[in-house]
């Protein structure tokens, strides 16, 4: 099971984009647990996938590659 957490302060366009990207990943791989964690720092938005912190300026392909890497590493 892959654990993805969106760490956010405000629900803005970038948050919605990350929510959509993780939704696509959950649909594609089925074994992703998506959670949300509100942080105190303003303008802070990042994702952790299996405790690895990732910035949110990447596109869908980057996150697909990250999940594929994690899945292949666990095998």
Image (cartoon, helix red, strand yellow):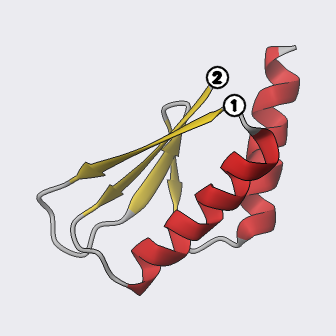
Residue 9 position, x and y percent, is 21, 66
Q: Earlier in the sequence, mark 1 or mark 2?
A: 2
Q: At x 73% / y 67%, what residue is drawn?
A: 60
Residue 40 position, x and y percent, is 11, 58
Q: Secondary structure at mark 1?
A: loop
Relative to 2, does residue 68 appear above or below in the rendering?
A: below
- On the question of residue 56 being in view, the answer is no
Q: At x 82% / y 50%, what residue is drawn?
A: 65
Question: Which residue ends up furthest to the bottom in the rendered image?
Answer: 13
Q: Crowding at label 2, few (<14), some or many (≥20) Cα neighbours within 10 Å?
A: few
Residue indicated by mark 2: 1
Q: Secondary structure at mark 2?
A: loop
Q: Which mark is residue 51?
A: none
Q: Is residue 75 left or right of residue 3?
A: right
Q: Is residue 19 left or right of residue 10?
A: right
Q: At x 78% / y 40%, what residue is drawn?
A: 29
Q: Is residue 43 left or right of residue 7?
A: left
Q: How many angstroms separate mark 1 from mark 2 (CA)?
A: 5 Å
Residue 18 position, x and y percent, is 53, 67
- On the question of residue 21 being in view, the answer is yes
Relative to 33, does residue 41 appear above or below in the rendering?
A: below
Quadrant showing the C terminus: top right
Relative to 24, does residue 57 appear above or below in the rendering?
A: below
Task: Classify residue 50 by image quadrant.
Answer: top right
Dots 1, 2 in contact, CB < 8 A: yes
Q: At x 45% / y 79%, what residue is drawn?
A: 14
Q: Crowding at label 1, few (<14), some or many (≥20) Cα neighbours within 10 Å?
A: few
Quadrant showing the N terminus: top right
Residue indicated by mark 1: 31
Q: Observer-nearest residue: 3 or 73?
A: 3
């Amino acid at each position: 099971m892959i654990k993805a957490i969106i760490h956010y302060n405000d629900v803005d366009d970038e948050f919605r984009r990350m929510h959509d990207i993780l939704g696509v990943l959950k649909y594609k791989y089925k074994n992703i647990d998506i959670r949300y964690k509100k942080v105190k720092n303003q303008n802070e938005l990042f994702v952790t996938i299996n405790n690895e912190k990732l910035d949110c300026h990447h596109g869908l392909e980057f996150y697909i590659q990250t999940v594929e890497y994690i899945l292949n590493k666990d095998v």
